[in-house]
Amino acid sequence: MNEPIKIRQLEAILAAQGWTYAARIGLSHRHWRHPDGSVITLSGDPSHVCDPAQLAAVQERRQGHVPATRPGAPFPTYLALITQTPSGAAGLIPDLTVLANTPATDLASTLEQAVALHLMTSGAPVPRPVYMGFQDLPPPVRAAYDDRDVEVQFVTPAPLNPVSLQVARAIDHSRLSYREVARRAGLGDADLARLANPFYTGHSVADLQRLATTLHLTVNVTFEEPVILPPHSVVSTTWQGDTSLLLELRDVPEVVAAALPLTVQSETGVFSLIERQDTPAGPGRTTYAARLLNGHR
């Protein structure tokens, strides 16, 4: 049997093969992007031992063997395979090549967050799951699980807080470092990182106003009653940034006849429809440039 390697060694291999690294400040999630646009997400402790099946899945992605995904339900549920390693627990979501290595008690929430961030980072239409069970896995990945205890779970993306995403975008647009923004705003580095954490929900108006003043921006809080969409009105989503997306909707009279921008609510979240697009859509459907206000990514 080959000597186990650690996650940091796997990341060194990706770097040597031309993958570029993007960390998320204050979070343990790391994204690796190939020049062809492929994304691999690794979450948790890089000092943990990498599970053999995780290695096999990364090898499949590195060789360009990826599932023939297609746009599907806006917020699907993905197959996750859980094993135990000498360092803790290892999770793999093969549809997306999302890996998580954490203590067992943290794995479920880490995988949910990793999926949400992976979909946001990839910038592609949210894919319909291909692997619905163990038997669907590519042979090299399935073989890596032979004669081992494997727990099967199904994971949906964790909800992202649009306020945090707006904070992160404002900092990025300022072209200042997080440390410099924190210094100018009179915040600690960790405090600013927490405000930009997409899973943090404890923002105070005072902190947001302080940050906005530092970045020469204003805070705008509005209360609106959204148009409630019928179930399954969202056909597909194509993300173009942290909160921006193209949203294909089944036509609803109240929406088709309304002036934009318009706030709508579906079973998957609340969106602001900003502009109708010329992008071809199916009969009885319209595509909108939209922004996520609240819900799952």
Image (cartoon, helix red, strand yellow):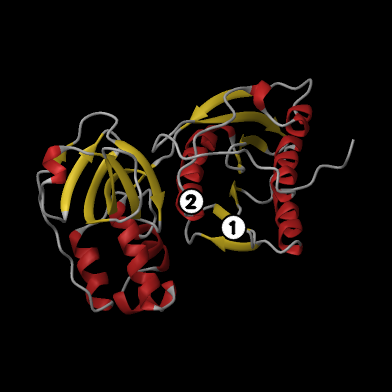
Q: Is residue 245 left or right of residue 99?
A: left
Q: Is residue 229 visible?
A: yes
CB-based contact (under 8 Å), mark 1 and mark 2: yes
Q: Secondary structure at mark 1?
A: loop
Q: Which residue is mark 1?
A: 37
Q: Label 1 crowding class (10 Å Cα cut-off): few <14, some 14-19, many 20+?
A: few
Q: Residue 197: which quarter of the image?
A: bottom left
Residue 279 position within the rendered picture, expressed as x and y whole percent measured from the top left: 35, 53
Q: CA distance from mark 1 to mark 2?
A: 9 Å
As drawn, 267 above or below 211: above
Along the line of sight, which residue is nearer the eye, 288 or 35?
Answer: 288
Q: Is residue 150 visible?
A: no
Q: Residue furthest front?
A: 283
For residue 126, side relative to residue 223 (left or right): right
Quarter the N terminus occupies: top right
Residue with the mark numbered 2: 124
Identify the residue at image location x=54%, y=25%. Answer: 153
Say which residue appears at 41% left-offset and 68% top-offset. Answer: 189
- Compared with 264, 141 (above or below) is above
